Structures are given as C-alpha cells and as structure tokens.
Amino acid sequence: MILIKKNKEPKAWTEYRQTPGVDYQPNSELVDALLKEQGYICAYCMRRIPCKDKLYKSNGRDYVETKEDHRIEHILCREKHDDKKLDYKNMVICCPGHIGDEDHCDRLKGDNDISFSPLDPTFIGTLSYKNDGEILSAKPEFNEEINEVLNLNTPLLKINRKTFHSTVINMIKQQQGEKPWTESVINKYIQKYSSKDKDGKLPPYCGIILYYLKKKLVSLS
C-alpha cells in the first residue's frame, strides 16, 4: 500500500450527495476522480485498475470474467456506518479482487471494517515488505487484518510484488553501474516511483520499491 492523498470531491458528487433523500449510487465522475487520485492502482494491493479478473469454474479450466473492473470501497463500510456512505473521504477505489484463486481487497472485506486506513501516514509508516513480496505491519492487529480481512498476501500478489521489485532494482543497478547509490540518486528514484506518468498513472506495486529505496536512504545516514 501507499499513502493516498485525498483531493477535493468532484462537483457532480457534491451535487448528488446534497440531493435530499438520495442513497449511495456511484456515478462516473466519482469513479474517474478516485482513479485519478490513486494513479489507477488499487488502494490495497496496488494492482493496475481498471481490470477484470477471472473466476474459474470447478473444472479449473473454464472461467468467466468479473462483471466489474473496479470496486468503490468504503473504508468504514456503509452497511455499519450509514453516515459515511456518501462521504468522499471514506472512499477509495479497488481492483475486482480475485487475482489467482483467492478473493482479496474489497471483494473479501465486504461488510467488515478495518482499523487502519491507506489515508493515514502513521499506518503507512508501519508497513514493510519481505524479500518474497509479503507485505506486513509492525502492529500485530494491523497485520492480522492485512491477512485475514484483505488477504493481501495471496501467492500471486506476493509474486507480482517480488517481480516488480526485482525488475526495478536490476534496472537501477544497470543504470548505476559502479557509481555509488548516493542520497541524490536514491531520491531521484523515489521521486520517479512515487510520481504519476503523463497519463496520470502510478507504477503498479510501487509501494514495495518505495519501501526498499527509503530503507536504503536511511542506511546512508
């Protein structure tokens, strides 16, 4: 995960939620705003969105694609927090939540709440990654929810994070050659992998490389 910085809610959503008697019903302006805000990556697993997932049948060969290519997630679920169901600050956007064989992210979370938020820099500061791509928190209660409520360490998600990390590190090593990893060099790459490209997109799984680079930066001091 990376820190999500909320922008001002889109005008069309403001107008919608201020309409007397409305219930939660997302519109295209809301979806577009959340996608752009997050750089088109899932708020939890950091996959590229929008995308569609494959739901395999019992024979293990045939499948259907998910009808949705994204899910709007209420950090505090709307089923238990009616006062938060239209609150833009309570919303992030996620992937369809079924890469590989397991449900994850909002698809698994459902009506459950989590005690942390990807909008909270203190929480993001508790996160780290293992060499195999596993994401974990220094706080046991957060770590339990990462695994049990969001299931962010499925085999395929771990492989994807590890692969992205290895690919980027090898590329940087080739570019650096024998030149040392100075503070300015590391900051250059931190800026690169925390910035959106010309299409407004962040690199998928960028959280793991940012963790590695920031850890390397600390080791220089």
Image (spheres, rainbow, N blue to C red):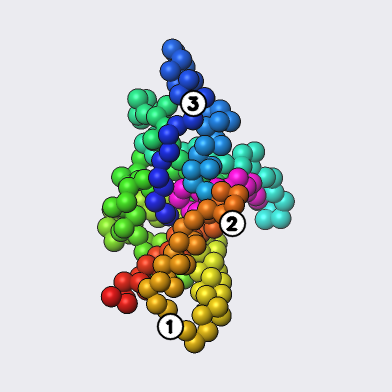
Residue type, numbered disc 3: Lys
* Label number found at residue 180: 1
Residue 129 visible in the current orientation: no
Q: For the residue labelled by badge 2, is the local secondary structure a helix, a strand or a loop?
A: loop
* Mark 1 Cα-neighbour bin, 10 Å: few <14, some 14–19, many ≥20: few
Q: Position of residue 104 (x, y in %)?
A: 49, 50
The magenta stretch spans which residues?
40-56
**Left or right of 58 in this view: 127:** left
Along the horizontal axis of the image, is 200 left or right of 9?
Answer: right
Counting residues from the start of the chain, the first of labels 2 and 1 encountered is 2
Task: Choose top left, top right, bottom left or bottom right for residue 131.
Answer: bottom left
Which part of the image, by quadrant, shows the C terminus? bottom left
> SS class of the residue under badge 1?
loop
Who's the residue at 39% across and 51% down the image?
3
- Please rate how many residues cluster around mark 3, counting C-alpha atoms within 10 Å: few if below 14, some from 14 to 19, many from 20: few
Q: Secondary structure at mark 3?
A: helix
Residue 100 disc label: 2
